[in-house]
Image (tube, rainbow, N blue to C red):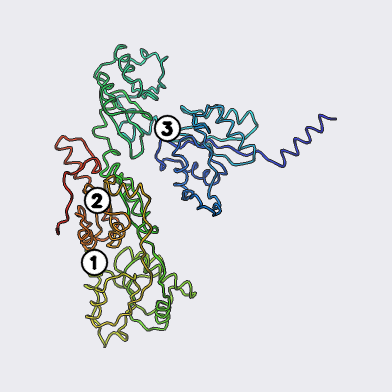
Amino acid sequence: MTRAKTTEQKAEHTSATPLGWVSFVGSGPGDPELLTVRAIDLLKRADVVVTEAPEHPAMVRGVLGIPEPVEPAEGEEAPEPIGPEFIDGGFGVDGQPLANAARAKAVVKQAKLGKRVVRLMTGDPFLYASGPEEAQSCAKAGIGFEIVPGVSSVSAVPAYAGIPLTTKDHQEVAVVTCNEKVDWSQYADNRTLVLLSGVGMIGDIAKELVAAGRSAKTPVAITRVGTTTEQSTVESTLENIAVDARAARMAPPAIVVIGKVVNLRETLSWFETKPLFGWRVLVPRTKEQAPALSLKLKGFGAVPEEVPTISVEPPRNPQQMDKAVRGLVEGRYNWIAFTSINAVRAVREKFDEYGLDCRAFSGLKIAAVGEKTGQALEAWGLRPDLVPHTDNQSAAGLLEVWPEYDADLDPINRVFLPRADIATENLIAGLVDLGWECDDVTAYRTVRAAPPPAPTRDAIKTGKFDAVVFTSSSTVRNLVGIAGKPHTSTVIATIGPATAKTAEEHGLRVDVMSPEPSIEALTEALADFGAARRASLVEQGLPVTKPSDRRPASRRRSRTS
């Protein structure tokens, strides 16, 4: 009777607190973009993420678009946490690495609380990892689990180094986890070897392989922190690898490849040869506009760091904008000219406030300063009637194609110009010269952002950034105002002549200027600069360095000084 009652009580407890589910997810070798679709889906639905590496929480927040937690000010209540709870499965409270059993215990504990647990593991859960042991603990506790393979560093890191593990002439690969008990005589043939945890003892391993019969000239490559923009590779031979690895300060995590396939890196290296590989690039932008530019820079191998310098806010006095929008609906204007994406956004928000839609533009001619502004209008369902030629998409370019006022053809001679509070007067003066009357309306304000953190300010002034990309004159003024001038070694890239002029007025020498005012043209121009710089260093037989690796002897001066 007692036994039956105990069983019944257990059943009631199980019903009240159902067991959770554990997903053992491989995070891959380091690049967040190598996470699988299934991995991202599980992270989105996770209650708890048990991490393994210190960079895992930032990786998860990045792929899920979750902001970093902010410490509340004294006396303020902590904000509601966003996203999953993070539990460190790599290190204990004493700072020491956790044993596999301790990690398994943490995973099982969370699952028993009925939570959906993602156990995020470096590389692949079932390859050189504690996944099998932790999964067995779940099985023993009666907790359901699944395995989501990750891209393994065994294949990914050599691929990012430009080294294929097999070819038509080399079809066998051996993967070896290195320790003192490995019998290296069994690897004396010409198979490709991939060594895990071998960088620390590579000198001894190389000696034993040569003693076993491998040629001392056998190619060797060591790649550390592979698939990330900090990746570096050392090429050598068995007889020289110990000295070369020590000179390059090779340290874990690293993958060693031994065999003739290493020679193919000369023609197949694609990642480390990107034009901006490893460059730390400062992106002084509005918060809303930075992601597109950062994404383009990442494609060229750069490490973008976004620093907000401008905040876009509504006008202090909205009455002028209200009056202009009413005039638009009532047919007061012949044209409306949009000089930025922000202007499109400001007018659209005002339309939403009044319950209007794009049908209110019926009979009105629309001008856009460039293709990007035109795309913002098209996303709203509007097609601009006038856009400058691609070689001069600016206010000056808009004036070049703007028609003169003709009293016989144009029933109304008034133009609605929603703009920023700090816009220049050149466009208005040009339109007046063409016979038009302008309602220059402040649609939004650009306000200087708060200064960046002290480490970022220090990096800007001391040349720890390799490049800065300026996308407007205001970003130049505001960055210098809140953080000071970039160091003389930092490459300065600007989106057009007006921005370049402002940079030079602030004592900066412009190294790169995009041929047209677009993010694509700006990033491509910077990439061309980086590629030319790299090619010049290679041609001179010099090591490929980044701008931040060198310090000029004298201060940089602007061309106008």
In whole angstroms, how far apart are the C-alphas of marks 2 and 3? 33 Å
Q: Residue furthest front?
A: 74
Residue 389 at x, y = what percent? 24, 66
**What is the total number of numbered labels drawn onto the structure image?**
3
From the image, tell me which residue sits under label 3.
152
Q: Residues within 10 Å of mark 1 (few under 14, many from 20)?
A: some
Q: Name the residue type under label 3.
A: Ser
Q: Which residue is mark 2?
A: 526
Of tags 1 and 2, the one toward the viewer is 2
Q: Earlier in the sequence, mark 2 or mark 3?
A: 3
Secondary element under disc 1, as helix, strand or loop, is loop
Q: Position of residue 559 (x, y in %)?
A: 14, 57
What is the quadrant of residue 558 in the picture? bottom left
Secondary structure under tag 2 reads helix
Query: What percent of the width, then of the height, locates residue 176?
Result: 40, 21
Q: Amino acid at mark 2?
A: Leu
Judging by the rendered image, the residue that carries numbered circle 1 is 389
**Percent from the top left, x then y, of residue 278?**
30, 41
- Circle 1: residue type: His
Q: Are marks 1 and 2 in contact (CB under 8 Å)?
A: no
Q: Residue at x 52, y 26 (%)?
A: 99
Q: Is disc 1 in contact with disc 3, using a CB cutoff of under 8 Å?
A: no
| Residue closest to the eye, 543 or 33 | 543
Q: CA distance from mark 1 to mark 2?
A: 23 Å
- Residue at left offset 21%, top offset 72%: 400
Compared to 487, does 128 lie above or below?
A: above
- Quadrant location of the C terminus? bottom left
Name the N-terminal-most of marks 1 and 2: 1
Judged by depth in the image, the label closer to the viewer, 2 or 3, is 2
Q: Who's the residue at 31% across and 86% down the image? A: 411
Image quarter in which the N terminus is found: top right
Identify which residue is drawn at 18% across, 51% down.
Answer: 556
